[in-house]
Image (cartoon, grey):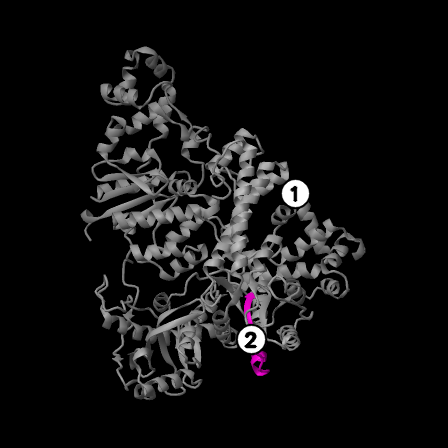
Amino acid sequence: MSQTASRLLLLDGHSLAYRAFFALPVENFSTTTGQPTNAVYGFTSMLINVLRDEKPTHLAVAFDVSRTSFRTEAYAEYKAGRSETPSDFKGQVSLIQEILDALQIPFLSLEGYEADDILATLATEANAAGAEVLICSGDRDAFQLVNDKTTVLYPRKGVSDLARVDPAEVVARYGVPPTLYRHLAALVGESSDNLPGVPKVGPKTAAKWLTQYGSLEGLVEHVDEVKGMAGENLRAHLADVLRNYQINALMTDLELPLHLSDLERRSWDREKVHQVFDTLQFRVLRDRLYATLEAAEPEADSTIEVAGELLGPDAVAPWLAAHAPSGVRTGVAFDGSWGRGTGELRAIGVAGADGAAAWFEPAQLTAADDAAVAAWLADEARTKAVHDVKGPLLAVTARGWTLAGVTADTALIAYLVRPDQRTYDLADLTLRNLRRELRAEGPSDGQLSLDGLDEDSAKKHLMEKAQATRELADALEAELGQRGGTALLTGVELPLVKVLADMERVGIAADTTHLADLEAHFAAEVKASAQAAYGVVGREFNLGSPKQLQVILFDELGLPKTKRIKTGYTTDADSLQWLYAQTEHPLLEHLLRHRDVAKLKTTVDGLLKTVADDGRIHTTYNQTIAATGRLSSTDPNLQNIPVRTEEGRRIRRAFVVGEGYETLLTADYSQIEMRIMSHLSADPTLIEAFTSGHDFHAATAAGVFGVEPTAVSGEQRSKIKAMNYGLAYGLSAYGLSQQLGITTEEAKALMTDYFEQFGGVRDYLTAVVARARGEGYTETILGRRRYLPDLNSDNRQRREMAERMALNAPIQGSAADIIKVAMLAVDKRIREEGLRSRLLLQVHDELVFETAPGEREALEALVRDAMGAAYPLDLPLDVSVGVGRTWDDAAH
C-alpha cells in the first residue's frame, strides 16, 4: 500500500467517550453485575460505524492522562470550571481500551499533554507523508488542523451523527479559514476550557476583525483603531486573548512511540473480542461488528466441506448401516421448528466418522427407512453429537421417534467451558475452536438467497452442520476434560435435557377465565392509579415521561432531589421508592402503584398470549444463559412471577391442576443458600444456629446482638437476614446500607459484629476470593467452574465486581447443581415406580408436580427422599412440601 493511498483515522478517546456517556442513559446500559457500560457501548457503536463508512487504512485513538498538562501549568484556571467526573463514567475508559486492544487498534496517551496534542502530531506527520487524515473529536480545537488533506468528523448529537468539517465548512460556520480558527477561538474564548474571551464579542465580530487585519497579530498591531464598546473590551481583555492564543495552540511535534507506519490497520484478536464482548454483554453490538466489518485477514484456516449424498427412497437404511455403526459417533443436524413444547422435523443431516455425509427428509421415508431411522435414533450404542439438542428432541418426540445415545451437545459443552459467553452459535464456535468456517445457511424453500444459495446448497449446509458438530464435539470435550467438567456434563447437564424437554412438552394448565379477570382488574388499577396521580397534581400528564415527572416532582412540588443525570434527576423506580420513604408524598404512592400494576398487567397479558390450544402454558427452559448454572425460563418467563405480594399470588392462582389429575404438589429447599454457606465455611456457630431449634435468622441475630433467640426484635432479625443472604451474594457494606436504609458506617459496624460471631464465614469468604484470584476460577460442589479474569484487573470497579461474583458463584452455583441433581433423581424414581404423576415446573429452588389420583402420598414421600438426598451437606437438606388445586394453594 503506498503512502499516497493511506487514510488515517484519528479518534479523541476521552472526548468521544464522555459524549457517549451523556448520550445514552446509564440506567439502560449496565451488565448483570452492575458495571455501567453506556460510554463503552456508545463509543464502540460509533467506532463500528465510522470504520464501516470511512474505511481507513490506518487508525489510532488518543486519550488524556489527567486534567493536569502544560496548559494548567501556564494557566492554573484552565478547565477549572468543569464538574467532577461522574462516578458511573469512571472505569469505562479502561473498558474502551480493552475493546481497542481486542480489535488491535493502537491507542496513545502522553503525560503532560492532551489527546488533542497527540492527534495534532500524528495528523501533521501523516499530512507530510501525503496521507489523508480524518479526526473524530468533539473538541472544536481540532478545527485548526483542518486543511485540504484533513477533515474533522464532529459529533452533532451524541456520537452517532457526525458532521464533516472541511475547510469550506469552517468558513461557512465561522467566517474564517481553518488557519485562523485558533485566532478566532482566542478572541471568543471557550467556556468548557474556562478560557474567557472578549465580552460582547462573538464569532461574527471576531471574524470581521480577522478578515480586516489578516490575523490576530495584525489585529493586535492595530488594536487602537478598533472602535466602539467592542474595541474598548478588546483592549481591556487583550491579555486574556493572548493567553488564550498561547494555550489553545495544539502541539504538532511531540515525541511519540508510534508513527504512521505503526498505525496500519491490523487483524483482530478474535478470542479477545469474544472475551471482552462477553464480559460487557454486548451480544447485539458484536453481531453488528461481524455483520458490518470484515476482519483485516481471513480468520479461518479452512472451510467445513462434505461430499454428501441426498438420500432418496430406500437409500437411508443401508447408508446408516454402513456409515453410522455402533461405537462410532456421528454428527447430526436437524432442520425444523420447535418451541412451546412441540416441534416439526423437515430434514436431517448426518456426518459419519468415515467422512461420509447424508441428507434426508423424514416425511419422504419409506416404511423400511422409517423403521431404520427410528432404530438408529433410539439406539444408545450408536452415539451422536448434536448442537443444542433440546429443541430437536421435542421435534423428534412429536414425530413419534425416540432420541437416545446423544453423548455430546456442543452448545452445552461450550457453555460449561465458557459459562460467561452470551451465545453459543454453532458457526461461531466452529470458527473459535476449530479455525474452520461454516458457510452461511441457505434457504429451504428452493428460492435463491442473497448469497445465491439454492435448495441444494441448503441441504449441503445441513450436512456441513452435522460435520462441524461432530468435529467440534471432540475439541470441546478435550477442553472440558482439562477443566474438570466432564462428570458435570455426563452426569447432570446432558441427562437433564430430556427432563426439561418432557416438562416443556407437558406444560402446566392455565385458568384462562381467571387470567382474563386479572387482566381486566389490573387494567382498571392502572387507570385508577393514574387518575389518582392526576388528582394530586391537578391535571393530566404522562406518567411514563421522566421529563414531565422531573418538572412536577422537583420544580413544582419541590421534593428532595434524587440522583443527578444528564437530563436532570432520575425518576426510576428505586429513586421514587427512596423519595417516598423520605416524604410519603401521595403522588409518589400513586406513581409507584401505577408502575406496580402496569408491570403485573404486562405479566398477565403475556401469560394469556402463551396459552396453547391444549389449555396449557409451555415455557422454554434454558441451560446456557446463567453463568452460575441456574436454569432460566422464557416465553413466558415463569420465574419472575411475584410470590411475596397478594396480587402476585393471584397470578399464581391461574396455574391449576389439569384434567385427569388430582392436585398440584410443590416442593422446595428451605434456606438452601445458607445451608451451603454453612457447609462450605464449616462455621460451627452458623451450623449450631441451624440445629438450635430456633428460627435460623433469629438464632444468628441472637449471636450478633448478644440476646436470647426469643428476645430478638423484628428489626434485628431483618438486619441479620439481609446479612445472611447478602453475604452469599457478595453484598458490600454500601449495598447493605441501601437495603436496610442505614448509613454505610452503620452497615460496616454490623458486618464487623457479624464476622466476630461467625469467624468461619469471614475466613471462608476471604479464602474463596484469594483462591479464585490465584486459580482464575471459582468452583461449585459438583465442579462447575466460573472463570473470573477480572479478579486481577487494574480496573477497580471490575475487580470488585469479579470479587462479588467469586463470592456468589460457588453458593448460587452449588444450589443450581443440587436442584438439577434432584430433578434427575425425582424423574428417575417416578419412572421406576411407575407413577403417572409428573414434574411440570422448576422455579428457583422449587419444583411443581401434577399428582395423579391416588398417588399423592407416594409422590410426596418420593420427592422428599430424592430431593433430600441430592447432595450430602454437613447440614441435611430440608424439603418443604405443599399441595393444592392451584400453584398458590400448593404454597407452603
Left or right placement of residue 819 versus residue 180 in this view: right
In the rendered view, tell whether residue 600 sits above or below residue 511.
above
Left or right placement of residue 56 versus residue 703 in this view: left
Q: Position of residue 115 (x, y in %)?
A: 37, 40
Pick the residue in front: 788 or 385.
385
Q: Is any atom of residue 575 visible in this view?
A: no
Q: Position of residue 848 (x, y in %)?
A: 58, 68
Pick the residue in front: 394 or 875.
394
Secondary element at image label 1: loop
Q: In which image quadrant can residue 824 be found? A: bottom right
The C terminus sits in image quarter: bottom right
Tell me what residue is drawn at x 31 percent, y 24 percent.
203
Foreground tag (2 vs 1): 2
Secondary element at image label 2: helix
Tell me what residue is drawn at x 55 percent, y 48 percent.
596
From mark 2 to mark 1, how far is it between C-alphas? Answer: 46 Å
Tell me what residue is drawn at x 75 percent, y 59 percent.
699
- CB atoms of marks 2 and 1 within 8 Å: no
- The part of the chain drawn in magenta is 826-842
Q: Which residue is mark 2?
A: 824
Pick the residue in front: 827 or 349.
827
Q: Residues within 10 Å of mark 1 (few under 14, many from 20)?
A: some
| In magenta stretch: residue 830 | yes
| In magenta stretch: residue 834 | yes
Q: Is any atom of residue 304 visible in this view?
A: yes
Dot 2 or dot 1, earlier in sequence: 1
Q: Amino acid at mark 2?
A: Leu
Q: Which mark is residue 743?
A: 1
